Amino acid sequence: MCGICRISSGAEFRDVSTMKQSEFSCGPRHKGENVVINRSFETALRCGAASLAIGLALGSAPVFAQAAPPATAIPAAQEDTGAPTGDIVVTGSRIARPDLDGTSPVSVVSSQDIALKAASTNIENVLNDLPQVTATTSSTSNNPGGGVATVNLRGVGAQRTLVLVDGRRYMSYDVNQIVDLNTIPAPLISRVEVLTGGSSAVYGSDAIAGVVNFTLKRDFSGVEAGSSYNVTEKGDGQVWDVYGLVGANFDDNRGNVTLLVDYTKRKPTFAGQRSFSTNALNDNQDGTPLYAAGGSGSVPQGRILVPGLNAALNNGCAASATAYQVFNQDGSSKCYTAADGYNYSPVNYLQVPQERFLVSAMGQYEINEHFTPYFEAQFSNNRVNAQLAATPISQGTPFGNGVTGPLTVQVNSPFLAASVQNALRTLDTNGDGYVTVPTWNYRTTALGPRVNEDERNAFRVVAGMKGEIGAGFSYDGYYMYARTKNSQRQTGNVAIDRFLLATNTAFQGPDGTISAFPITGGTVVCASAAARAAGCVPANIFGLNNLSAAAASYIGIGATNLETYTTQVANFSVTNPNLFDLGAGGVGVAFGAEWRSEAGAVTPDQYLASGNVAGFNPGQPTSGSYSVREFFGEIRVPLLANTFIHRLELNGAARATHYSNAPGNVFTWAGGAELAPIPDITFRGQYQRAIRGPSVYELFLGNTVSFNGNADQCGTAAAVTNTQLNAICRAQFAAAGAPATLIGNAGIQDVSVNPLTFTGGNANLKEEVANTYTLGGVFRPTFLPRFSLTVDYYNIKIKGYIGAVPTQSIGDLCFKSFNQAYCNLISRNSAGQIETFTSTNQNTGGLKTSGIDVTAGYSQPLGALLGADDARLGFSFSGTRLLVNDFTPVVGDPKVIRCAGHFGAQCGVPTPKWRHTLRTTLGLGQISASLQWRYLGAVTDDDPTTVYASERFKAQNYFDLTTTFDATENFRLNIGVSNLFNKQPPLAASTQNGGNGEQSNTFPTVYDVLGRSFFVSGKLKF
């Protein structure tokens, strides 16, 4: 009877199809049966195909079934290779096969490779090194952030990458239906397989760019304890992790129970702790260098812009209609310059703090060959904070269904110097003692920074049964329930209604008389009687540090979002890897059915829901659910073997899906072929129709707001000379009551004007549809043992792309294409500035991307050279050439955003045309040293119409060095240095400061922002 085969140590980021016979060994099957591979590679594996198929099927059944551990202990130097210790099933198919060749390229990261990476307890730090992955959300994501870590294959969005754990769907972190990698038990990971190309016919919705499948250790027996510690050379950025793993086989290896407990603590690193991010850089958009003067125009001194005030003050900017007055501490004012701006950068996080507690348990028991019940359970408590500078507030801050609007300022306020009072009196045309201030900015530093505390409690349980049916058929059925609850607590926010009441002041006399004009013996109070009764405290926002503690307490509030998300899956599948034989090997089939339910809700408190909050973005409640019923099948047909060609094999898969909501009935399919004319070369190709159903977020999002930049064109010279554009601008100005004389005035679309964008869900959304294909080859020359090379071309084209119409597209379609439907989505204020853009989710866009992946591996024994039998040298290479990454925001609009080799305000994070990693490992006995070279190609800005200070980022090279010591058979120690040469990140000002960067003057998820760091990790097993 054939045994269970194990792949021996594989090189990092290796294509699974390149593994060879020498990398396999066999151990005992359950109940003590043994086998030795002494036949050809294919014959031996084919012999095991029937037993390997138990529990494997199409659908959401496990990709890798469980198997017993080897009979003898694995030497310490070979432990945790990340190889499967059970059936040979490659991600992308549910049918057990007699070899590791697959029609879709699959890259493998082993547990040994994971251990070589600094801060690998956060698994995204490992995955983001893969050339196929675009780093978008990680431990360095502060704003945007969200307290999560995700994986984004091919840069098409994390929601288009399906994350599996042991071939099953995992738990989503919120209504976006994306997996937070923080919830995956890293110490249990045996290996990670990354599949390129659509896989919806095999796995269902979301697998458009590909699949990332985390395979966990099975049948663990013994006790293992491990810990790691990371710190930068500056003594900050500490990450500490400790875990304990216990497992036991019982009843003659018929059953197993495994338990993991893991704790992680990550300390924050502030932007102010690095020279490149201490100051918020600015960009004039004229090609001049970046400069650090000032920062944001929302300043704690307060600043105002009132028509006629500059002339009345005559303090240096009398002739300007766009210059602000900024206040000194004594209440006097001066003309605002860039040097007066607020440097918001230092208090922002470069690395967000985290505290995580994770428990995972697994078990199974083989009653007989027909019945093996099993279970899995995971629980994660994950706490991550984000921190931003103190709350900025202005006339454009979202408030309810509109914006905060103008301030009402008391002319005779004692908060103002006499010079300002006198100037304001000339503007008080109705003599009521008040002047309206249409444009203003303030920052509430007295409240401290804005802090967002995410505490996610997530749990997942799986209960199932698997076994043999007979005649080569086996089954696997299970039910999964997963739920995530996030309590998001915010501090540093401002209640807008209170702010407006507190800044509208009056005098109160000893007898209770209220007047805008001075009263003998009077004191300053809030003008509103109702506000005074509710405890209103007058707020002095005119001058640095003039806001009293009492006033700060009155206007400051906390806020809370409660988020819940639930996923349920019921799956039953049947498989037979050898239904019959056409002479070239067994024809394999798999079929089954699945039911899935997705439900989620976001419940903001009264401040966030009403929009009565400045600081973090408000939003309406989101709540909804849908269900999916699916039937699926898969077939693999070996046609020829060892004839005039070495091997020819075809495969196909299909899935019929019914959504309970708008997508309705959906059909996906796949077909592929492998051709090996000779044993050394295999050609492969796969074509797939993939889909992604809309998420709960996209379907049911309550109205929310964000700041996505300004797409105004009415402040340009063309707005005066172009007849069509001028007519559009005049109509918008008339509707807002703004003077038409401001058309063509550049000040109305100054970089300090940041309109808000209202977005919302759409219950009528249809599915995204993608056509994907891969073509490639595998070269394993018999004349060069231990060498392998794969080259694969991938092509992904998405139609019906779901998203809100981008703010820039709304502006372009209105002001350049003169499309009135999009002009209707824009509103202005009385100063002529755009206040809001409105957009809901639509199936409106398209995206296509293509490229070439190259992997290579080689190992060379050095025994003869070094006089040691176990000396070895290995190389592992993985590279990606990005050919196309084009995004069409609105089909029919000629605008196409081309992101291959670009970065910036439209494309976001850099997507270089070439990326690679090369790992070189030298091993000698129980000691090995591994050097990794990470290369990111040069990128240029994505907007040819604007000249930024940072038009090009040159190529970046990072080097990491790790040494591994197998001190004893039971103890392994890793010591390493990351970013060996302390490479600093390229710089670009953020978009809010006129630049084309993201956070902290760079892109911290892509480029190393912490500098040289050191780590040590140890593992004790007995």
Image (cartoon, rainbow, N blue to C red):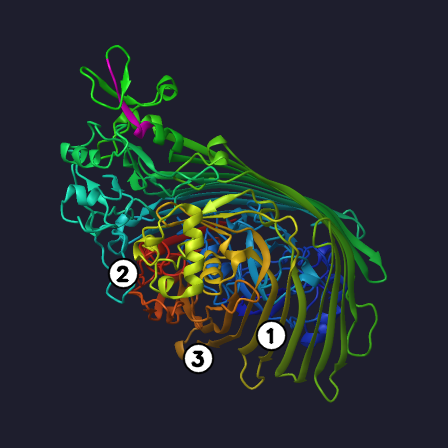
Q: Does 8 lie within the magenta span?
A: no
SS class, disc 1: loop
Q: Which residue is label 2 attached to?
A: 284
SS class, disc 2: loop
Q: Which residues are magenta?
A: 502-509
Q: CA distance from mark 3 to mark 2?
A: 63 Å
Asked where in the image residue 331 lies, by quadrant, the reply is top left
C-beta proximity under 8 Å, tags 2 and 1? no
Q: Which residue corresponds to the image point at 17% horizontal and 49% vertical from the top-left?
A: 317
Q: Where 1005 falls versus 506 (above or below)?
A: below
How many numbered marks have been drawn onto this rendered protein structure? 3
Q: Which residue corresponds to the image point at 14% horizontal and 44% vertical from the top-left?
A: 314
Q: CA distance from mark 1 to mark 3?
A: 23 Å
x and y percentages locating residue 821 in the rendered image: 54, 57
- Asked whether the viewer can see residue 929, the reply is no
Q: In the image as oriented, which residue stretches furthest toward the bottom?
A: 644
Is residue 801 left or right of 551 when viewed as pictured? right
Q: In the image as oriented, which residue stretches furthest toward the top?
A: 511
x and y percentages locating residue 635 in the rendered image: 77, 68
For badge 1, the amino acid type reads Lys
For badge 2, the amino acid type reads Asn
Q: Which residue is label 1 attached to?
A: 20
Q: Which residue is label 3 attached to?
A: 864
C-beta proximity under 8 Å, tags 1 and 3? no
Nearer the observer, 600 or 120: 600
